[in-house]
Amino acid sequence: MSDRRLQVFHTVARLLSFTKAAETLHMTQPAVTFQVRQLEEQFNTRLFDRTHNRISLTDAGQRVYDFSGKIFDLYSQMENAVKEMTGEISGALTIGASTTIAEYMLPALLGDFKSKYPDVAIHLKVSNSEGVVAMVENNTIDLGVVEAKVSNKNLVVDVCRVDHLVAILPPNHELSEQKVVTFQELTQFPFICREEGSGTREVIGDYLTKQETACDLKIAMELGSPEAVKGAVEAGMGVSIVSRATIQKELRLGTLVAVVLDPPLQRPFSFVHPKQKFRLRVMEELLDFAQMYCQDFKEQSK
């Protein structure tokens, strides 16, 4: 974009925060403030009202914000039109992913995509599912990949694949020889779970509410990553439920035992992005590539 000032202003106006805009644009806050002030000097009017550590758009600021959105949309259309003529796929994308997906699914997918499109720059932000959805809602990322249901009807949700969750136990556990285990049996032991806001935690909660018999977890620990959960179970501190995709190494080494749940527990891995009239071609290519990648995974898993 030729006018960096307008891009910075648009980001501040969308987020109504200089601090969040600085994080999104990978700039310092003073640099963001300077760019906005330069634009205000150009128009010779204030674009933001600043009161009590909050900002809001002035009437002039709202007008500039409305036009800037149209300008960026036209700019994207122009860029795509030229790239379709030249066959070029390039640009930058920011992806947000929940921890399980970022650690176990995306590295191979993004690596293959990068091999096919070396001129595309991809930035990855990792959070729990709740945090990723919030980043999509705030337009701080282009695409989110989450492991829980998304309730916001203003977002587009495309299911990539179905993930199967299993109970994990240390090899010497009294339930480790069973082929299946009920949740009620698991509740007899200390339970290691993910933090609030985690997609895994949310799916387990939904699963519990559907059980015909009351099941109260004896939560011994709340941990912030699949690796930490697995480590605690390996150390004999309790049992847990995780994605089967996260424990392949431990199963090979024999440090954990996986037992199928009765009834089975599964969840969708989904791509989440804002509803937009027009998207950059590189975004379309990534979505198409990811869908084909997930389809290949399904075929291999049969």
Image: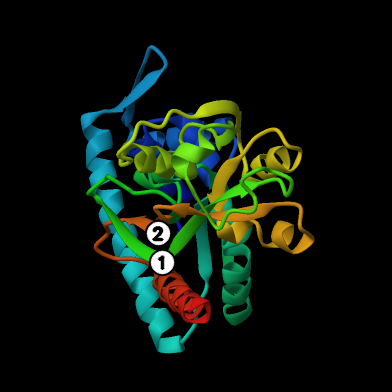
* Circle 2 residue: 270
Residue drawn at x 43%, y 80% is 83
On the question of residue 35 being in view, the answer is no
Residue 57 in the image: state x and y as whole percent.
28, 30
Labelled disc at residue 45: none
Of label 1 and label 2, which has the lower sequence position? 1
Task: Report the side of 177 relative to 182 (left or right).
Answer: right
Residue 250 in the image: state x and y as whole percent.
72, 56
Mark 2 element type:
strand
214 versus 119 height, above or below: above
- Asked if the residue at tag 2 contacts the one at tag 1, i.e. Cβ–Cβ closer than 8 Å, the answer is yes
Residue 182 in the image: state x and y as whole percent.
46, 46
Residue closest to the eye, 3 or 244: 244
Residue drawn at x 34%, y 58% is 72
Residue 279 occupies quadrant: bottom left
Q: Residues within 10 Å of mark 2 (few under 14, many from 20)?
A: many
* Circle 1 residue: 160
Q: Amino acid at mark 2?
A: Ser
Task: Report the side of 97 relative to 252 (left or right).
Answer: left
Residue 1 in the image: state x and y as whole percent.
45, 59
Residue closest to the eye, 64 or 123: 123
How far apart are the alpha carbons under marks 1 and 2? 5 Å
Q: Residues within 10 Å of mark 1 (few under 14, many from 20)?
A: many
Q: Amino acid at mark 1?
A: Cys
The image shows a total of numbered marks equal to 2
